[in-house]
């Protein structure tokens, strides 16, 4: 029994299903129609990320270049110091070598 306040269904159940399907089809058509507009922010984001990535790679390359130049300079300074101090460390090295040749080695325990 149906109350008098709520009269029966205003339309058939099949009609409601048809309207739902029609609504979804129309919504799909609208989405397909405005897809390029919806895709624009994604394209802008991708381009922005590529530009930022390129700038960061440029910064990394600059830092690496400075680091390698600094390393080459330190190596050059070390070689100059070795060349300048060669009159001191070469005779010391020769004496250490002669002492190690002349020194008797202890016998290894078996």
Image (cartoon, rainbow, N blue to C red):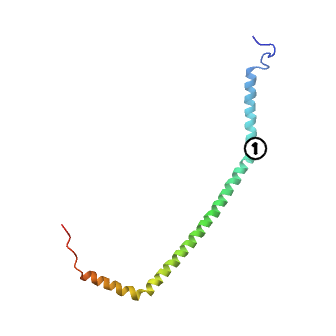
**Looking at the image, which residue is at 40% across and 89% down?**
87
Q: Please tell me how crowded label 1 is: few (under 14), some (14-19), or many (20+) other residues with Cα within 10 Å.
A: few
16 in relation to 98, above or below: above
Left or right, 104 with reference to 79: left
Horizontal and vertical percent position of residue 61: 59, 68
Q: Report the residue marked by disc 1.
A: 34
**Looking at the image, which residue is at 73% across and 33% down?**
24
Specify the quadrant that holds the C terminus: bottom left
Left or right, 50 with reference to 85: right
Most foreground residue, 85 or 31? 85
Element on which disc 1 rests: loop
- Looking at the image, which residue sits at the far left? 110
Most foreground residue, 8 or 15? 8
Horizontal and vertical percent position of residue 68: 54, 73
Quarter residue 44 falls in = bottom right
Quarter residue 25 falls in = top right
Horizontal and vertical percent position of residue 32: 73, 41
- Looking at the image, which residue sits at the far right? 5
Left or right, 100 with reference to 4: left
- Looking at the image, which residue sits at the far bottom? 87
46 in relation to 26, above or below: below
Number of labelled discs?
Answer: 1
**Looking at the image, which residue is at 59% across and 69% down?**
63
Specify the quadrant that holds the N terminus: top right
Left or right, 103 with reference to 3: left
21 in relation to 55, above or below: above
**Looking at the image, which residue is at 76% across and 27% down?**
19
């Amino acid at each position: 029994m149906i109350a008098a306040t709520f009269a029966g269904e205003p339309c058939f159940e099949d009609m409601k299903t048809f309207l739902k399907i029609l609504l979804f089809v129309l919504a799909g058509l609208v989405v397909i129609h405005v897809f390029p507009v919806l895709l624009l922010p994604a394209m802008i984001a991708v381009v922005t990320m590529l530009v930022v990535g390129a700038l960061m790679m440029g910064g990394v390359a600059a830092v690496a270049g400075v680091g390698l130049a600094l390393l080459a300079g330190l190596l050059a300074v070390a070689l100059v110091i070795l060349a300048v101090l060669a009159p001191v460390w070469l005779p010391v090295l020769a004496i250490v070598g002669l002492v190690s040749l002349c020194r008797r080695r202890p016998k290894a325990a078996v």
